[in-house]
């Protein structure tokens, strides 16, 4: 039986003191998803939590082997204004992803929200890191809850 995706959504700015605990929680919850039969993981490609989640899926892939990392990127070239280090990390994740879906060819004011809806529309579970009720993560979580998708907020465990 094929299961739907587990998507990730979280803030770009993560306090340094939360990072180590967050990495451990990501590993724990991805392993739980795998134990429940989920094999498909969908990340949004942004800096911060999205990057941490993608790296955690890639670590799990080394342990489990049969899981897939899909990326939903808001628009082509989104990383062009990032630092060299962040671009290299993005390109490394991109190269290791099993599939990549670009929402838009060029930036437009709604491409981020369309990316968030795409992830929710293709998922059965949303693992998030949400510490405030505004912004893209709050929007994604609200969309997930509206659709009856299970939401796990890792910020509640830090």
Image: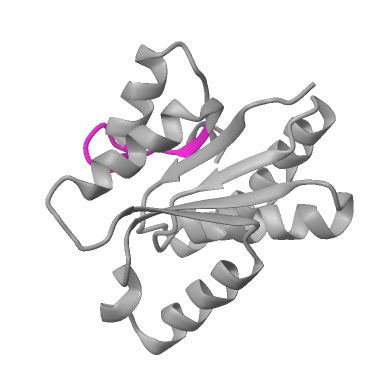
Residue 86's place in the image compared with 32, above or below, is below
Seen at 31% across and 72% down, the residue is 77
Residue 20 picture location, percent across and down: 62, 59
Which quarter of the image is occupied by the N terminus? top right
Report how many numbered discs are placed on residues in the image. Answer: 0
Residue placed most toward the observer, 135 or 92: 92
Residue 145 picture location, percent across and down: 40, 16
Residue 39 picture location, percent across and down: 74, 38
Residue 93's place in the image compared with 46, above or below, is below
Which quarter of the image is occupied by the C terminus? top right
- The furthest residue to the left: 109
**Range of residues picked out in magenta:** 127-137
Residue 47's place in the image compared with 33, above or below, is below
Residue placed most toward the observer, 92 or 130: 92
Residue 113 picture location, percent across and down: 25, 40
Seen at 47% across and 64% down, the residue is 16
Left or right, 124 with respect to 64, comes to left
Left or right, 1 with respect to 149, comes to right
Seen at 19% across and 61% down, the residue is 107
Left or right, 96 with respect to 53, comes to right
> Does the magenta run of residues contain 136?
yes
Seen at 75% across and 59% down, the residue is 59
Q: Which of the 4 quarters of the picture holds residue 86?
A: bottom left
> Does the magenta run of residues contain 68?
no
Q: Which of the 4 quarters of the picture holds residue 25?
A: top right
Left or right, 110 with respect to 34, comes to left
Residue 143's place in the image compared with 81, above or below, is above
Q: Which of the 4 quarters of the picture holds residue 37?
A: top right
Residue placed most toward the observer, 107 or 130: 107
- The furthest residue to the bottom: 84
- The furthest residue to the front: 105
């Amino acid at each position: 039986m094929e299961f739907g995706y587990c998507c990730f959504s979280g803030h770009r700015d993560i306090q340094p003191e939360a990072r180590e605990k967050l990495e451990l929680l990501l590993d724990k919850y991805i392993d739980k998803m795998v134990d429940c039969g989920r094999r498909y993981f969908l990340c949004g490609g942004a800096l911060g939590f999205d990057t941490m989640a993608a790296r955690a899926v890639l670590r799990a892939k080394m342990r489990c082997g049969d899981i897939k990392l899909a990326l939903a990127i808001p628009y082509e070239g989104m990383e062009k204004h990032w630092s060299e280090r962040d671009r290299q990390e993005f390109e490394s994740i991109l190269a290791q992803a099993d599939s990549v879906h670009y929402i838009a060819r060029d930036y437009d004011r709604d491409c981020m929200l369309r990316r968030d809806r795409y992830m929710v529309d293709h998922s059965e579970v949303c693992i998030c890191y949400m510490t405030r009720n505004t912004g893209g993560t709050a929007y994604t979580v609200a969309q997930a809850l509206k659709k009856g998708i299970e939401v796990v907020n890792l910020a509640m465990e830090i």
